[in-house]
Amino acid sequence: MATVFLDLDGTLIDPYLGISTCFIHAMQSLGLPAPSPDGLQWLIGPALFDSFAKIGVHDPELALRLYRERYCEVGLFEAEIYPGIPGALAALKSAGHTLHLATAKPHIFAKRITAHFDLDQYLDHQFGPEMNGTRNDKGELLAHALELLGETAETCIMVGDRHHDYDAARTVGMRSLAVRWGFGNKEEWCQADGLCEKPDRLAAMI
């Protein structure tokens, strides 16, 4: 049986509405031009501090605080579970696999989201960065999780939709599985060890 680390955004839930709306809120609060809400898919995956820095925001720490003003109240629940995900998680558990969350989202937010959508029942542990940015790097996050759990990478697999997931898995010597229904693309998926087309195929591919 495998230990399965699951990404959250783009793998278990579609968080686009909440993330894009809060990102625009932060930009407007800074007096900066608001981007189109239709072209922000690139936000899903990396740490938001890095995303604000990437587009040249002078004070990404302030931008992140402004983002969280709205996100803490409403944005984190402006999401939808991908169809078939609860059944896929139940099938993985029934097959004897151990499931953990490994997300770039601060774990304090991730736990509220998984509880709200009743996904926490499938997860033994939920790993994410601290609010101050500690373990924003997903490779560091997985290394921390392995150490805490006493697991070896050879018995584990990282499941996610973006290259950040596969890069992190490779860093710690873990296998990775790409999912087609998130925010990744063919160039990213080919960096994983496999590609899952639909949630109902997930258990068979672990």
Image (spheres, rainbow, N blue to C red):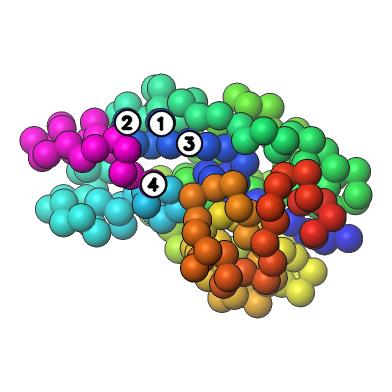
> Magenta segment range?
23-41
Question: Looking at the image, do the residues carrying marks 1 and 2 touch, with CB atoms under 8 Å apart?
Answer: yes
- Residue 94, percent from left and from top: 90, 43
Q: Is residue 124 visible?
A: no
Q: Residue at x 53, y 64 (%)?
A: 186
- Name the residue nearer the viewer: 147 or 178: 178
The secondary element bearing badge 3 is classed as: loop
The earlier-in-sequence mark between 2 and 3 is 3
What is the number of the mark on residue 15? 3
Q: Residues within 10 Å of mark 3 (few under 14, many from 20)?
A: many
Q: Earlier in the sequence, mark 3 or mark 4?
A: 3
- The disc labelled 4 sits on which kind of residue? Gln
Q: CA distance from mark 2 to mark 3?
A: 10 Å
Q: In 3D space, how far apart are the residues under numbered discs 3 and 4 (Cα atoms)?
A: 10 Å
Q: Mark 2 highlights which residue?
A: 21
Distance from disc 1 to disc 2, alpha carbons, whole Å, reads 6 Å
- Please state which of the two labelled residues, at mark 4 or mark 2, is closer to the viewer: 4
Residue 75 falls inside the magenta stretch: no
Residue 28, image x, y percentages = 15, 33
- The quarter of the rendered structure image containing the C terminus is bottom right
Q: Assess disc 4: are there few (<14), some (14-19) or many (≥20) residues with their C-alpha within 10 Å of its C-alpha.
A: some
* Type of amino acid under label 1: Leu
* Tag 3–tag 1 contact (CB < 8 Å): yes
- Within 10 Å of disc 2 (Cα), the crowding (few <14, some 14-19, many 20+) is some
